[in-house]
Image: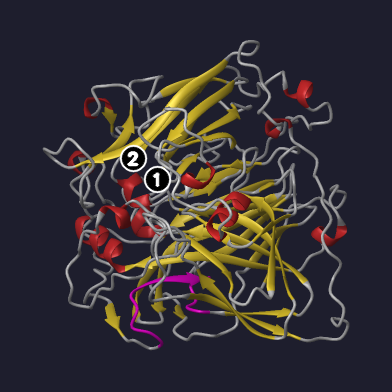
């Protein structure tokens, strides 16, 4: 079926836990409505920008700085779909009062999974995503999908984790000449209704929400990490709730379910985890300190900003998105575990299962490079301050950020800084790939910068590390990291902390690195890649690959690896629809310990007519 969505990008009055302000959001709510589609289906989306002029800071001098705060577009993060119009084209610029139609075609061989959407206009991404403009996109299981019924029928909670950070919002608003709010004193008011924190992690834009679950019953948590800087790791306080990892970044594990002691999310990540709690009462989900240098584990709200404080630049460990101590917000959310008829005995344990494999996700680990031509690239991100030939000690909006070249080679060559390539325009590339080929990238420095690539997910092949091991391999830290990140896993976004635990030293680079492989499958044109610390992306830490060849070409070796893998089929579709008002809704999310609010759900019917459920 076809899912038709009209989405209005406009304003909402936000009454939060510690401040009131005006937000830019989709359809007056945050997170936005959850959009559903089936493999073989399509989404026809009209995005209407109801914001008003002025444009704000813009022009050639605004490139790779925060700018055009009232212009937008939309990106579907994670699906294996075309990046060209009318599909997931992130180069579209919808100025105030403009609209655009998107048509997202999902092939019949697309794996069901959890994805998300958010604005992706270069220069305004951090400002818009950082205030809550994001929502979930779910590719649902077909009725006959080969997956255990206990997984298919599991009740679920949808959770968009939103990091609200006043320092980035104030900085981006100031530099971009944003007239909606400056996050200090214009359309902004400190209330301290529930807390005096101004840098916190929200779940569905709620501070410390309460999630009700029946004891001994499995629930599927679909999670997306909408954060422009911080990562998070959290666990069950008493251990009464167990976690079974099913999928990451919308792709089922080949060894699902996998027992994990903690849930780990970096900016841009998605995860599906089956959760079962064995004890009636309140169970806290606590941010963790996994004891690393720089410390790994928790979201770090240690730096707070009073209403009259100016924008401040953070030390390098904060600015590059490491995992930190959770000193001031140790609790992420509360699980209210209740008894119910029939819950005296626990649900059966989850058995190992596999799902049908699309040909674009066959295992690439055993490919012989002497028999198959595999392209190779070294990706490394960096920023430099004016006149400074090294990583800056502080994060500054005047930094030049980019991806190391040269073209087709990437990082690792000298001289160093002369090869740093900031983003320039939509027609400049850093490498080119032939559609139907296998590519391999060494991701250097992914402890600091979450690498995200559009369209084609990648598989972890190997992890390297030059640092001396500093963590007990039998420790909780090692267990948490090793269980969450494993060779063979598929991702579209990767920030891999604690490489000292799982890396091997082969002298690859000055820093820890991860080798990944992927198929350049079906789609030609732009394939964007960038750091998913979106303030870095806005500052130029973004590049693109040129996918060349014939549209629809696939790698002919997939069936040699898995004779049953599902090949794509050809299909097409399209469709239209407009309305802005001078009023906007109020989102009162000021109280803690309130029931978690599920986003509105938008489904397709068999006849293609949209069905909306609250």
- Along the line of sight, the residue nearer the viewer: 46 or 434: 434
| 207 drawn magenta | yes
Range shown magenta: 194-208
Q: Is residue 385 left or right of residue 506?
A: left
| C-beta proximity under 8 Å, tags 2 and 1 | yes
Lower sequence index among marks 2 and 1: 1
Extreme residue in the left direction: 387
Residue 402 in which image quadrant:
top left
Identify the residue position indicated by label 2 in the image: 541
Q: Residues within 10 Å of mark 1 (few under 14, many from 20)?
A: many
| Residue 408 in the image, given as x and y percentages of width and height | 41, 19
Q: Is residue 146 left or right of residue 446?
A: right
Q: Is residue 497 left or right of residue 59?
A: right
| Residue 429 in the image, given as x and y percentages of width and height | 39, 25
> Is residue 5 something that shows in the picture?
no
- The correct choice, above or below, for 133 with respect to 374 in the image is below
| Residue 557 in the image, given as x and y percentages of width and height | 72, 19
- The correct choice, above or below, for 93 with respect to 34 in the image is above
- The disc at residue 449 is 1
User: Quick one: quadrant of the C terminus?
Assistant: bottom right
CA separation in Å, label 2 and label 1: 10 Å
Residue 325 in which image quadrant:
bottom left
Residue at image position (70%, 46%) is 253
| 165 drawn magenta | no
Q: Residues within 10 Å of mark 2 (few under 14, many from 20)?
A: many
Residue 427 in which image quadrant:
top left
- Number of numbered labels in the structure image: 2
């Amino acid at each position: 079926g076809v899912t038709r969505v009209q989405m209005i990008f406009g304003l909402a009055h936000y009454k939060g836990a510690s401040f009131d302000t005006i937000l830019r959001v989709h359809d007056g709510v945050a997170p936005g409505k959850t959009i559903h589609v089936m493999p073989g289906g399509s989404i026809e989306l009209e995005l209407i920008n109801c914001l008003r002029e002025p444009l704000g800071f813009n022009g050639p001098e605004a490139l790779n700085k925060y700018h055009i705060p009232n212009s937008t577009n939309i990106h579907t993060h994670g699906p294996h779909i075309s990046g060209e119009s009318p599909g997931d084209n992130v180069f579209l610029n919808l100025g105030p009062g403009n609209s655009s139609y998107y048509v997202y075609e999902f092939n019949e061989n697309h794996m069901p999974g959890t994805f998300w959407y958010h604005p992706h206009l270069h220069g305004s991404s951090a400002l818009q995503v950082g205030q809550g403009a994001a929502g979930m996109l779910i590719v649902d299981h077909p009725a006959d999908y080969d997956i255990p019924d206990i997984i298919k029928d599991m009740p679920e909670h949808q959770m968009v984790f939103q990091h609200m950070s006043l320092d980035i919002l104030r900085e981006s608003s100031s530099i971009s000449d944003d007239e909606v709010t400056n996050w200090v004193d214009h359309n902004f008011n400190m209330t301290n209704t529930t807390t005096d924190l101004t840098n916190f992690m929200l779940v569905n834009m709620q501070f410390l929400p309460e999630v009700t679950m029946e004891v001994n019953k499995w629930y599927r948590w679909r999670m997306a990490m909408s954060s422009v800087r911080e990562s998070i790791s959290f666990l069950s306080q008493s251990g009464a709730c167990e976690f079974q990892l099913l999928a990451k970044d919308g792709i089922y594990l080949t060894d699902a379910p996998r027992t994990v002691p903690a849930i780990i999310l970096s900016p841009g990540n998605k995860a599906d985890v089956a959760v079962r709690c064995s004890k009636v009462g309140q169970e806290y989900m606590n941010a963790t300190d996994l004891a690393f240098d720089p410390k790994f584990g928790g979201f770090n709200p240690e730096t707070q900003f009073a209403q009259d404080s100016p924008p401040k630049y953070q030390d390098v460990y904060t600015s590059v998105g490491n995992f930190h101590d959770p000193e001031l917000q140790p609790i992420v959310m509360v699980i209210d575990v209740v008894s119910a008829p029939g819950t005296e005995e626990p649900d059966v344990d989850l058995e190992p299962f596999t799902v049908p494999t699309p040909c674009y996700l066959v295992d690439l680990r055993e490919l012989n490079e002497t028999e198959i031509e595999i392209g190779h690239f070294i990706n490394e991100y960096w920023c430099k301050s004016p006149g400074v030939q090294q990583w800056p000690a502080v994060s500054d909006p005047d930094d030049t950020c980019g991806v190391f070249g040269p073209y087709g080679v990437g990082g690792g060559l000298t001289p160093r800084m002369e090869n740093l390539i900031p983003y320039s325009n939509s027609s400049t590339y850093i490498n080119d790939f032939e559609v139907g080929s296998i590519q391999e990238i060494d991701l250097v420095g992914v402890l600091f910068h979450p690498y995200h690539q559009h369209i084609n997910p990648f598989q972890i092949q190997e992890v390297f590390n030059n640092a001396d091991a500093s963590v007990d391999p039998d420790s909780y830290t090692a267990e948490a990291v090793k269980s969450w990140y494993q060779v063979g896993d598929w991702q579209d976004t990767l920030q891999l902390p604690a490489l000292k635990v799982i890396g091997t030293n082969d002298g690859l680079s000055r820093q820890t690195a991860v080798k990944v492989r992927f198929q350049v499958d079906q789609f030609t044109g732009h394939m964007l890649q960038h750091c998913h610390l979106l303030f870095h992306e806005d500052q130029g830490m973004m590049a693109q690959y040129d996918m060349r060849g014939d549209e629809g070409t696939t790698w002919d070796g997939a069936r040699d690896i898995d004779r049953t893998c599902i090949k794509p089929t050809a299909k097409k579709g399209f469709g239209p629809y407009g309305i802005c008002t001078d009023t906007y809704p109020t989102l009162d999310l000021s109280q803690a310990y309130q029931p978690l609010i599920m986003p509105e759900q938008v489904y397709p019917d068999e006849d293609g007519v949209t069905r909306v459920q609250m």
